[in-house]
Every structure is written in C-alpha cells, then in structure tokens.
Amino acid sequence: LVPLRPRINVKQYTIILLIFLAAVSGYRYGYENILGQMAVAVLLTGITNSIIEYFRTKMLRISDSGLITGLIISMVLAPNSSLLLTGLLSIVAIASKYILRLNNRPVFNPAAFGLMIGVIFFKSILGWWGDYYHILTIIAGSILLIKYTGHWKMIFTFLATLSILIFVRALISGSPVIDQLYLNISISSFFIFFMLTDPKTSPLLPDQFINFGILTAVGSFMALIFFPSALFIGGLLAADVFVPYLNYRSLRKLTHNPLEEKF
C-alpha cells in the first residue's frame, strides 16, 4: 500500500505563503531588523492560542490560526519595532479572538485588532514590510485565493470602491490622481489577500462578500482622511462590526419561503 500524503489545509497554505513573503521581503530590509519581532509575535500568539484552547478543549496542540496572526502582526509592524510591544500586541490579538465573540465567532480580525491597539495607545507604526515586492504578494495571494470560494468578489469590490473614492477626492483637492491611487492601492496587496479575506471574520456566505468589500473600502477611505496611521486596519475593523448583520441577511434569505407571502 502507498501511504497517503497528508493534505495541507488552507491555514497551512497561508503560513507557507506568509513565510515565503517574509523571507523575500526580509532580505531587502535586513533579517536582523525583522527576525526578532517575527519570532516574538509567532511564539507568543502560538503559545497564547494553545493555552486558551487547552483550557477550552483539554487538548494541547499548535494553533495554525495563532501562527498566522503572529506572522501578520510582525509583517505589518514596521521593522525594528519594540519586541516588548510586539509581544503585548500579539497577546492582545489572540485574547480578542476569545473575548470579543458573537454567535461563536470572533467579532474582529485578531491581527487587525491587536495592531489597532498598538496604533491608538502606543503610536505603533505600520510598515507593511511583508509587501515589499507587490507582484510577489499578488502571486502568493492569488494562489491562496484559489482555496477561498468567491472571495475574489470582496477583493475586486474593495479595490474598485476605494479607487473611486480616492479618485474623486483627488479631483476635488486638485492633487495628482495617479499618485494618490498608486500610493494607496499599491500598498494594499498584503492587506486584501491576507487580512480582508479572513474566513473567520468575513461574512459566512458569498452573497454578502460584495457588501463587505464596499464597507471595508469606505472604512479604509475614512481612515485615510481622519486616521491615516490606521489605514486599512481601521476600515477592516469598522466593516467587521457589520458582519453579524450581513450574516443575518444571508441566513434570512436561506430560510425565507416565498410561498408564505401568498397567504
């Protein structure tokens, strides 16, 4: 008998792709500037997630989702970020996943929540260094997108809506349209593929992916104007608030019986 190969799930694909991007982009920034915060974030998110899961299930295992959260936090924070702060935000991110819950799902994207805490209270700088080579991020993200049915809808909707809003703002303010579009759209590759599409905090069913993409784009645009240091993560957290309602609408459609309206 030929032994079956262990199947790689979506989370493991995500980890592999994130490590690849970190290895390539880290070379440009200098590994000495990024490896420390990566190690701290991944270690603490993994340990924190595993400890909480053990108390919940009495099973000790390494959490793939915890590792993903740690990788994202370390790759979004600017290189040479404080290791103490990186560790604190990593723990806060995982804690939010279990404390801020509704219908047995986390309300907020854990990595985005942890990063927002850093921006608001500790003036953390988001460097998005994991997206140094945009084309590689797009390729890696497209590979991951194959595993997510219909998520291209929220990505294209997000990009289209944000582009239109930035275009209109640039025309009104008289600033160069192309420069504004490139500045904001080009740095969103990492965000749209590895944070926007998070299956645990995005809508359950594809019929609401477009609405979620629009809400995130509007929120990101508002962050760009009023809170630029929280660009994208502010928009995502704002959109996450509406996910329970979007899920309610989806489930209502599924359970709705058109025959009831005839009586």
Image (spheres, grey):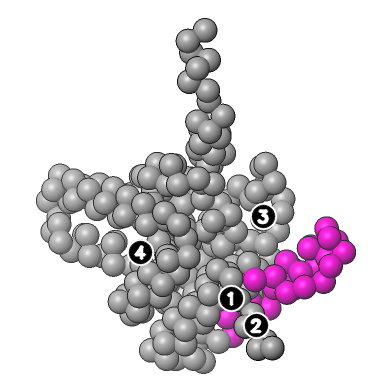
Residue denoted by label 4: 188
Which residue does the image show at 55% across and 68% down from the upper left? 10
57 vs 106, nearest the viewer: 57
Type of amino acid at the residue the image marks with label 4: Ser
Rounded to the nearest angstrom, the CA distance separating label 3 from label 1 is 27 Å
Q: Quadrant of residue 54?
A: bottom right
Question: The N terminus is located in which quarter?
Answer: bottom right
Q: Earlier in the sequence, mark 3 or mark 1?
A: 1
Q: Secondary structure at mark 2?
A: loop
> On the picture, is 132 further left or further right than 44?
left
Q: Earlier in the sequence, mark 3 or mark 2?
A: 2
Rounded to the nearest angstrom, the CA distance separating label 3 from label 4 is 24 Å
Specify start and end residues of the magenta stretch as a single range: 36-64
Rounded to the nearest angstrom, the CA distance separating label 3 from label 2 is 37 Å
Say which mark, if any, is on residue 96.
3
34 vs 252, nearest the viewer: 252
Rounded to the nearest angstrom, the CA distance separating label 1 from label 2 is 12 Å
Q: Is residue 172 above or below residue 199?
A: above
Q: Secondary structure at mark 3?
A: helix
Type of amino acid at the residue the image marks with label 1: Ile
Q: Residue furthest front?
A: 1
Q: Earlier in the sequence, mark 4 or mark 2?
A: 2
Residue denoted by label 1: 8
Residue denoted by label 2: 4
Q: Please say whether residue 222 is one of the residues in the magenta stretch.
A: no
Q: Main secondary structure of the magenta part?
A: helix
Which residue does the image show at 22% across and 60% down from the upper left? 181
Type of amino acid at the residue the image marks with label 2: Leu
Q: Is residue 127 above or below residue 23?
A: above
